Amino acid sequence: MDELLAVIDALADDDLTVVFGPQLNARLRMLLTASNKLAALLARTVRQGELAQAAEHDGLKSMASWLRGHGHVSSAAAARLVTTGRALEQLPAVEGAFSAGAVTGEQVAAIAPIVAPENAAKAAAQDVDLGEVDAALAVVAAAKPHKELTEVVAGYLARLDPDGPEPDPTESRRLSMARHADGSLSLRGELDAIGGEKLQAALESLVQAGRCAGDDRTRAQQQADALVQLADNALAAGTLPTLRTVKPHVAVVIDLDDLAGPATGPATGRMGFGATISAARARWLACDSTVSRVVFGPDGAPLDLGREQRLADRHLRRAVELRDGGCVFTGCDAPTWWAEVHHLVHWLDGGETNLDNSALLCERHHTKVHHGFRIERQPDGRWRTWRPDGTEIRTGPPLLQPAA
């Protein structure tokens, strides 16, 4: 591994400004091949980690959660890596092309559905030779554009069940949300015909009710505004399920000076789901909101409940959520509404119910710290985690030692 990293470092030192087009193209082809080979090795390693339950060593439940927390990859990328690793075990021809660098990880992900349990069962019932399908798809993936490969896979899956039962419409529903650095949100999703009809009916009613003279918004803008209004109405109605004993609401944390001051204050307020907004936007929200004062000290909410109360009340929970922002176990990305308030020194052992003795942990990691794992908050506010054997859990790639 050290030699591999050294070779990559050497390539990174090349001056590409003196390289001409044909040479750059040749270099790109070689780099793509190398990238594919590394991706194949990565997928196989992820699968072996899954079989060996390697994530448990760092206190996590699955390789997908390990990849998110320790590899710093997105949920979608982590799921794709796990799925790819599983599929390669059943697709030797595709695996060979992948390892040779002729096939990309994205192509393998497109092929993977053919060995999903339900599709493999249909193929077996029809005496389909998956070995032949595997070999054919490996050739198509290596020789044809990605779009053509996806069409071939879709055709194969359609032929597996041409006259099957009506599919469950909910199985095709998908919604993913990607947050950007400025706090804005991109949506991507799919709805079945009935679900889509319901959403369109709800949005259209708000679009039509909001029409007025001089409205120069595009259709896309009108629908986006209607979706936000739909969320406003649902939150205001107070009928949504509670999140950890608290009614769902839009929350923003901002210092009193910033809230009261005149400055715009970019990236000043922190919202409940992690977005940051300006002080100006926070003041706009506060015009029609309940403003709560949270003081980390003896003059505000009763953060220090001493020995009289074992469970954290809503004041203490709010303070812990504001400070920790989610599960503090290293590598975990569980949000506040999945988490519980944990006593660092157990209440039965004399620990007090106060902010200093509290930590936010998801249910899984709350269990872990009661079975040998240990967390500790540093003076600078960072949390650190240790395994039962005393070794510390760290995320990200190891720091390279400087050359002698």
Image (cartoon, grey):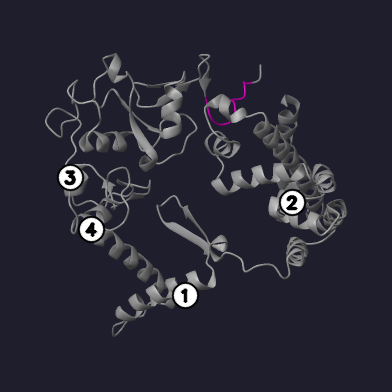
Q: Are marks 1 and 3 in contact (CB under 8 Å)?
A: no
> The C terminus appears in which quarter of the rendering?
top right
Residue located at (36% from left, 80% from top) = 216
Q: Tag 4 or tag 1, which sits nearer the N-term?
A: 1
Tell me where residue 271 appears, x and y as whole percent. 32, 48
Please tell me whether residue 170 is drawn above or below residue 366 in the rendered image: below
In this picture, is 349 found above or below 70?
above
Q: Amino acid at mark 2?
A: Val
- Badge 4 vs badge 2, beta-carbon distance below 8 Å: no
From the viewer's perspective, is residue 362 above or below residue 389? below
* Residue sitting nearer the eye, 271 or 346: 346
Q: Position of residue 173 (x, y in %)?
A: 53, 62
Nearer the observer, disc 3 or disc 2? 2
Q: Residue 222 is drawn in which quadrant?
A: bottom left
Whether pointer 3 and pointer 4 mark residues with C-beta atoms closer than 8 Å, the reply is no
Q: Which residue is mark 4?
A: 284
Name the mark nearer the viewer: 1 or 4.
Answer: 1
Secondary structure of residue under mark 4? helix
Cα gap from disc 1 to disc 3, whole angstroms: 40 Å
Whole-number angstrom distance, CA of label 1 to CA of label 4: 34 Å
Q: CA distance from mark 3 to mark 2?
A: 53 Å
Q: Residue at x 27, y 18 (%)?
A: 351
The three-letter code of the residue at mark 4 reads Trp
- Residue depth check, mark 1 versus mark 3: number of the one nearer the observer: 1
Q: Which residue is mark 2?
A: 115
Which residue position is annotated with label 1?
197
Residue 209 is at least partly visible in this image: yes
Q: Are marks 1 and 4 in contact (CB under 8 Å)?
A: no
